[in-house]
Image: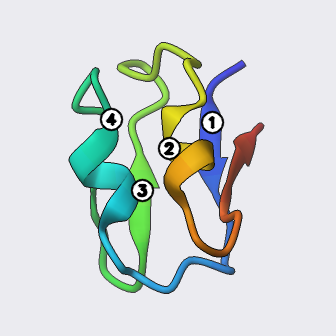
Amino acid sequence: MAYKISSDCISCGACEAECPAGAISAGDDQYVIDADACTECGTCAGVCPVGAPAQD
């Protein structure tokens, strides 16, 4: 089950920089995760200061 970024995202970019799969990119209002590229490693959740990424 891929990770998804909730509306709690503050667009700090910490998750994008740490994603080993390159599955995270800046969206219009917040960062988004490409579910097809996500390897479900959880790195994004570990570095997010507000806990926005979570398994969908």
Disc 2 marks which amino acid?
Answer: Cys
Q: Secondary structure at mark 2?
A: helix
Earlier-in-chain disc, 2 versus 3: 3
Spatial CA distance of label 4 from label 2 is 6 Å
Q: Residue at x 62, y 46 (%)?
A: 45
Spatial CA distance of label 4 from label 1 is 11 Å
Earlier-in-chain disc, 4 versus 1: 1
Disc 1 marks which amino acid?
Answer: Tyr
Q: Check disc 3 and report the residue beneath it.
A: 32
Q: Quadrant of residue 18?
A: top left
Disc 4 marks which amino acid?
Answer: Cys
Q: Are marks 3 and 4 in contact (CB under 8 Å)?
A: no
Task: Residue 34: give x, y in percent of width and height.
Answer: 39, 36
Q: Check disc 2 and report the residue beneath it.
A: 44
Q: Residue at x 50, y 44 (%)?
A: 44
Spatial CA distance of label 1 from label 3 is 9 Å
Q: Are marks 1 and 2 in contact (CB under 8 Å)?
A: yes
How many residues crowd mark 2 within 10 Å: few (<14), some (14–19), many (20+)? Answer: many
In which quadrant of the rendered image does the N terminus lie? top right
User: What is the number of the mark on residue 3?
Assistant: 1
Spatial CA distance of label 2 from label 3 is 11 Å
Asked if 55 appears above or below 20 in the picture, the reply is: below
Asked if 54 appears above or below 11 in the picture, the reply is: above
Earlier-in-chain disc, 1 versus 3: 1
Spatial CA distance of label 1 from label 2 is 9 Å
Q: What colour scheme does the image use?
A: rainbow
